[in-house]
Structure formats: structure tokens, C-alpha cells
Image (spheres, rainbow, N blue to C red):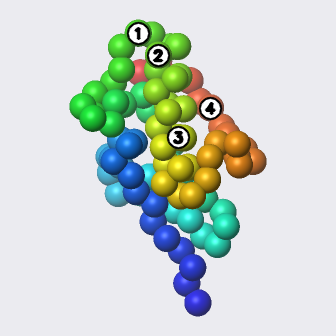
Amino acid sequence: MNNRAVISTTAAPSAIGPYSQAVKVGNTVWISGQIPLDPETMELVSGGIEAETRQVFANLQAIASAAGGSLDNSVKINISLTDL
């Protein structure tokens, strides 16, 4: 029995590369890493680290919502800050 579902929403940036926005297995959702892209333009938001952080969390929330949950249901969130 395969109870795996790919989660996808237009309210978050589409996956760039060979991965999904999220995968739901049973009652557990694994959300892929997010960068501060505006889902409508697929461009990085401007405004510095605060605006970028808000966008990343908005993207995460949109994906969690598409999976039937919210960030309130999160068990663990890893954050990596890198100046590319």
C-alpha cells in the first residue's frame, strides 16, 4: 500500500529542479527547502533579510496549507542563512 502524495500549490514558488514542494506520507508532510521567491513572479523579493524571511515563511505556510495543515503543526524547522 502506497500512501504517498505529492503536494503542490500555486500559492508558493514552483519547484526549480527535480523535486516537489512537499510530499505527504500518511499524516507526515515533508516540505522542501524554500527561498524568498515571490510565487507570482518567481523572482527574489526585495527589502533585505526581513522581507526575505517573511516570504520564506509565507511560502512554507502556503505549502503546509495545501497539505491540509499549518505551520502550527510543525515539529521541526531548519533554517540556513547563506549569502549567495
Q: Tell me the CA gap for discs 2 and 1.
A: 5 Å
Q: Which mark is residue 47?
A: 1
The reply to whether the C-beta atoms of the residues labelled 4 and 2 are less than 8 Å apart is: no
The reply to whether the C-beta atoms of the residues labelled 2 and 1 are less than 8 Å apart is: yes
Residue kind at label 3, given as amino acid type: Leu
In the rendered structure, the answer to whether residue 8 lies left or right of residue 3 reads left
The image quarter in which residue 45 lies: top left
Q: Tell me the CA gap for discs 3 and 4.
A: 12 Å
Residue drawn where x is 66% and y is 37% of the image:
78
Residue kind at label 4, given as amino acid type: Ile
The reply to whether the C-beta atoms of the residues labelled 3 and 4 are less than 8 Å apart is: no
For mark 3, give the secondary structure: helix
Disc 2 residue crowd, few under 14, some 14–19, many 20+, Cα 10 Å: few
**Residue 23 percent location from the top left of the image:** 52, 62
**Lower sequence index among marks 2 and 3:** 2
Q: Which mark is residue 60?
A: 3
**Lower sequence index among marks 4 and 2:** 2
For mark 4, give the secondary structure: loop
**Above or below — where is 74 with respect to 5?**
above
Residue drawn where x is 44% and y is 32% of the image:
35
**Lower sequence index among marks 3 and 4:** 3
Q: Tell me the CA gap for discs 4 and 2.
A: 15 Å
Q: Which mark is residue 51?
A: 2
